[in-house]
Image (cartoon, rainbow, N blue to C red):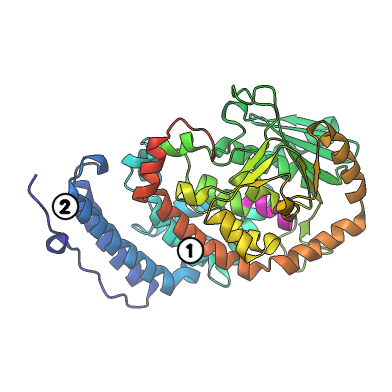
């Protein structure tokens, strides 16, 4: 191949005018030309050094323009897509609408489908454009809270299953089993083939189950526990969570909107801050439904599993369990773990866990920073029942609502997630991450 020079193939960046219509046309024209030049290159795995540099140069130019466009027009863009904030649209729906209404701003449905069919290392990395888009929206003072509201509404599947759970007290999903016993709903993770690691199916099932718990008037307390797995090392044992499914990441099936952002703005936010049952600003008595939550940790809570513990009101762990956030080793960001862990442990321990990969054993002196009780595994069930009885109290629900407000003010939370949207998108396609995932494609979870 003949070497190419990025400077010689540059697509000049137009100067934006400040007018939405005019700037959208400039963006569309620029990205159309840049996309055509990218399409003329070999596929990412087949590019030599000069063509990798050219592709990076073209992407950087287009993303710079997208960032400038969204910096000037985020509020206007969001109002166009949501009919002046009278319509709630979730992450994926909003991004696809933006691709249709503002060509070149984010990838189209066809482009995303083509990328989805490729392993992570073979993709162009178009989700980074979505990261630019959502960083601007989530940091906008009006668009951010409205988008967060959209993600806190009950999901469609939960509304469809609500009556079934109300009358039968149980629902079985592909990777989650939900059962109500008395006033306590037990959510059991059953993604056994991968040590209960998280994939997009599990994220969808978790959100459905969490919504059902929060919608159900007969349920006062929610419990999450991992089910038994079939991994040879842990066969017949319960496992709480192995974190993100690295095999799915290697295969290119972990998406920004369907997994990483949906997880944070969806079921984790609903556990921490409640389900939005009435979006009206003057809703009475509350816009959200809150309930206390208990986590029961068998074996380990790794990565996303440990992140999950940070939004629970009471955590019970087996005495041989451990907790870790190996995201730095994997090269990615551990969700909102960076936002929450320091509040629980203090700054220095949080850095040791997140930056240094320190593993906390349930028997360690500092284990109390991440869990409330450490007991023999065979006692967990009884301890869960006792904790649920204590938390089944209207005063507990009222006070955990106030604790959530004090600990995670919405403006700070959205400011964090705005940066997370972009940083995590770029990390998904960083060379070090792709190299690490390629070395361990068969490893199911974040261990």
Nearer to me, 239 or 256: 239
Q: Residue at x 35, y 57 (%)?
A: 103
Please say if the residues under marks 1 and 2 sit with CB atoms less than 8 Å apart: no
Instruction: Kindly report the distance in space between the C-alpha atoms of the residues bearing marks 1 and 2.
Output: 30 Å
- What span is in magenta? 266-275
Q: Classify mark 2: residues with Cα within 10 Å, few (<14), some (14-19) or many (20+).
A: some
Q: Secondary structure at mark 2?
A: helix
Q: Classify mark 1: residues with Cα within 10 Å, few (<14), some (14-19) or many (20+).
A: many
Nearer to me, 18 or 174: 174
Location of mark 1 (residue): 135
View extreme (left): residue: 2
Q: Is 57 placed above or below 293 here?
A: below
Q: Is 87 placed above or below 209 here?
A: below
On the rendered structure, is 86 left or right of 329? right
Image location of residue 382, percent across then percent down: 88, 36
Nearer to me, 292 or 10: 292
Q: Is 331 placed above or below 167 here?
A: below
Residue 85 seen from this side: no
Question: Split into 4 quadrants, where in the image is the C terminus?
Answer: top right
């Amino acid at each position: 191949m003949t070497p190419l020079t990025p400077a010689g193939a540059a697509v000049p960046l137009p100067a934006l005018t400040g007018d939405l219509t005019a700037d959208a046309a400039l963006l569309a024209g620029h990205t159309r030309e840049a996309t055509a030049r990218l399409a003329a290159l070999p596929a990412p795995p087949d590019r030599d050094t000069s063509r990798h540099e050219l592709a990076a140069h073209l992407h950087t130019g287009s993303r710079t323009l997208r960032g400038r466009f969204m910096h000037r027009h985020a509020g206007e863009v969001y109002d166009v897509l949501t009919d002046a904030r009278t319509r709630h649209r979730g992450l994926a729906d909003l991004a696809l609408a933006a691709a249709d209404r503002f060509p070149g701003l984010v990838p189209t449905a066809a482009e995303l489908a083509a990328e989805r069919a490729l392993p992570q290392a073979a993709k162009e990395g178009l989700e980074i454009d979505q990261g630019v888009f959502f960083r601007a929206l989530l940091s906008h003072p009006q668009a951010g809270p409205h988008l967060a509201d959209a993600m806190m509404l009950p999901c469609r599947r939960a509304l469809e299953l609500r009556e079934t759970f109300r009358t039968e007290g149980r629902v079985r999903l592909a990777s989650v089993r939900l059962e109500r016993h008395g006033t306590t709903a037990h959510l059991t993770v059953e993604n056994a083939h991968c040590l209960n690691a998280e994939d997009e199916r599990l994220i969808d099932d978790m959100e459905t189950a969490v919504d059902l718990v929060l919608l159900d008037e007969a349920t006062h307390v929610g419990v999450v526990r991992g089910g038994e797995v079939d991994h040879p090392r842990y066969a017949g044992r319960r496992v709480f969570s192995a974190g993100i499914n690295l095999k799915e990441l290697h295969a290119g099936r972990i998406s920004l909107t369907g997994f990483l952002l949906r997880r944070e703005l969806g079921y984790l936010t609903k556990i921490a801050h409640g389900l939005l049952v009435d979006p009206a600003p003057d809703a009475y008595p509350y816009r959200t439904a809150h309930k206390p939550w208990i986590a029961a940790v068998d074996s380990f809570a790794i990565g996303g599993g440990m992140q999950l513990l940070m939004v629970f009101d009471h955590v019970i762990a087996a005495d041989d369990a451990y907790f870790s956030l190996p995201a730095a080793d994997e090269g990615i960001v551990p969700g909102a773990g960076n936002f929450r862990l320091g509040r629980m442990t203090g700054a220095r321990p949080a850095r040791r866990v997140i930056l240094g990969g320190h593993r906390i054993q349930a028997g360690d002196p500092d284990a109390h920073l991440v869990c409330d009780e450490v007991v023999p595994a065979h006692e967990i069930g009884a301890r869960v029942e006792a904790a649920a009885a204590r938390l089944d109290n209207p005063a507990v629900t009222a006070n955990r609502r106030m604790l959530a407000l004090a600990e995670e003010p919405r403006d700070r939370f959205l400011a964090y997630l705005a940066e997370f949207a972009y940083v995590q998108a770029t990390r998904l396609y960083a060379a070090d991450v792709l190299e690490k995932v390629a070395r361990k494609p068969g490893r199911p979870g974040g261990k």
